[in-house]
Image (spheres, rainbow, N blue to C red):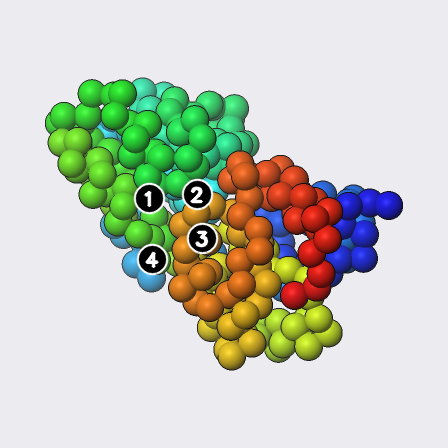
C-alpha cells in the first residue's frame, strides 16, 4: 500500500508551481485537491522595478527570496528587452528558487544560498561569509514581503534596495472552491509560505481554525499556528521532497484524518 493511499491533500500553490508536488503526492497514492489561493500580478506601478533593472550593472548582488521573484524579474527583463548582466552575482534563498534562476536565466547557478535554513534568516547568515560593506544589493520582493533580509543585510553594512517586483493576490472563485473542498473533508492542507497561510485564513474564514496543515519552513509554521491552524507536519528539510517524506512519516505513525 502506498504511504498516502486514500489521503485527501489540499494543495494551495499556483498551478504552475504546484505541478511537481501534485505529481509526487498522486504517485504516493494521495487524492489531490487543487485550489490555488495565490496568484502573482505585476506591481501597481512598475516604474521603480524598471528603473532598478535598468541599472542592474551597478549592483553587486541580486538576491531572490522566492521563485515568484525570479519569474517576475525574468518577465520584466524580457519585456524591457534586457538581459541579466553576467557580472551581477545571484543569491537564492533555497533550492527551488535556485532552480528557477537556472531555468529563467540560461542555466546560471546561484552564487550563494543557505546550506540548510532555506528562508530569509538563512540567507542573511549565508551572506556573513561575504564582504558586504558598501556593496549594493537589489532585492526584488512581493508587496507582502517581510523586511528580515533587508534589515539583516543592512546590519552587515550593505546598501540594500528593495523594490516591489510583483503583487500577491487571491484568485477569483477560490473561496467557493475552497469551501467545497473543506466541506467534502481533507486530511491536510499544504501551505508553503506565510502569504499562503494568510490567503487560506482569508478564504476559509472560521473553517481555518483547527484545520490540519502541513507546512514548508518554520516561518510558515509560525504563521499557521498564529492563524489557529493545527500544524501536523513541518517539512524537514524545507523542500517538496522534505514535505513528501514528512507526510509519509506522519501518516505511517497512525495519524487519522484531522
Pointers 4 and 1 in contact (C-beta within 8 Å): no
- Numbered circles on residues, count: 4
Looking at the image, is mark 3 or mark 4 earlier in the sequence?
A: 4
Q: Residue 189 location in percent, x, y?
A: 61, 60
Left or right of residue 102, residue 248 in this image: right
Q: Residue 220: which disc?
A: 3
Dot 2: what SS? loop
Can residue 233 be seen in the rendering of this structure? yes
Identify which residue is drawn at 33% across, 57% down.
Answer: 143
On screen, residue 60 above or below 225:
above
Between residues 141 and 253, which one lies in front from this camera angle? 253
Quadrant containing the N terminus is top right
Q: Kindly indicate the quadrant of the structure image that contains residue 148.
A: top left
Q: Which residue is mark 2?
A: 66
For label 2, count other residues whose C-alpha is less than 10 Å away and answer few (under 14), some (14-19) or many (20+): many
Looking at the image, tell me whether mark 1 or mark 2 is earlier in sequence order. Answer: 2
- Seen in the picture, residue 82 relative to 21 is either above or below; the reply is above
Give me the residue at 40% from left, 28% from top: 113
The CA span between labels 1 and 2 is 9 Å
Which secondary structure lies at badge 3?
Answer: helix
Label drawn at residue 143? 4
Q: Nearer the viewer, residue 228 or 127?
A: 228
C-beta proximity under 8 Å, tags 3 and 4: no
Left/right placement of residue 245 relative to residue 65 reads right
Judge by depth and name the residue closer to the eye, 81 or 189.
189
- Tell me the element at label 4: loop
* Label 2, label 3: how far apart the Cα atoms are: 14 Å
The x and y percentages for residue 147 are 26, 49
Q: Position of residue 187 (x, y in %)?
A: 68, 62
Dot placed on the residue nearer the N-terminal end, 2 or 3: 2
**Secondary structure state at the residue bearing disc 1:** strand
Residue carrying label 1: 140
Amino acid at each position: 500500500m502506498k504511504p498516502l493511499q486514500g489521503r485527501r491533500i489540499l494543495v494551495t500553490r499556483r498551478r504552475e508551481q504546484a505541478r511537481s508536488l501534485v505529481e509526487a503526492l498522486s504517485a504516493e497514492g494521495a487524492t489531490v485537491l487543487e485550489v490555488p489561493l495565490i496568484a502573482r500580478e505585476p506591481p501597481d506601478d512598475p516604474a521603480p522595478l524598471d528603473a532598478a533593472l535598468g541599472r542592474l550593472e551597478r549592483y553587486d548582488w541580486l538576491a531572490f527570496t522566492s521563485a515568484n521573484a525570479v519569474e517576475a524579474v525574468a518577465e520584466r527583463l524580457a519585456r524591457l528587452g534586457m538581459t541579466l548582466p553576467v557580472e551581477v552575482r545571484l543569491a537564492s534563498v533555497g533550492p527551488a528558487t535556485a532552480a528557477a534562476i537556472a531555468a529563467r536565466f540560461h542555466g546560471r547557478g546561484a552564487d550563494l544560498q543557505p546550506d540548510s535554513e532555506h528562508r530569509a534568516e538563512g540567507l542573511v547568515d549565508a551572506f556573513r561569509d561575504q564582504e558586504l560593506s558598501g556593496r549594493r544589493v537589489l532585492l526584488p520582493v512581493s508587496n507582502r514581503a517581510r523586511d528580515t533580509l533587508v534589515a539583516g543585510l543592512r546590519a552587515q553594512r550593505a546598501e540594500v534596495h528593495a523594490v516591489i517586483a510583483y503583487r500577491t493576490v487571491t484568485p477569483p472563485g477560490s473561496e467557493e472552491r475552497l469551501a467545497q473542498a473543506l466541506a467534502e473533508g481533507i486530511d491536510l492542507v499544504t501551505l508553503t509560505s506565510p502569504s499562503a497561510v494568510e490567503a487560506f485564513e482569508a478564504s476559509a474564514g472560521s473553517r481555518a481554525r483547527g484545520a490540519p496543515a502541513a507546512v514548508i519552513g518554520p516561518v510558515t509554521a509560525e504563521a499557521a499556528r498564529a492563524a489557529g491552524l493545527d500544524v501536523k507536519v513541518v517539512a524537514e528539510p524545507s523542500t517538496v521532497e522534505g514535505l513528501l517524506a514528512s507526510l509519509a512519516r506522519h501518516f505511517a505513525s497512525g495519524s487519522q484524518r484531522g
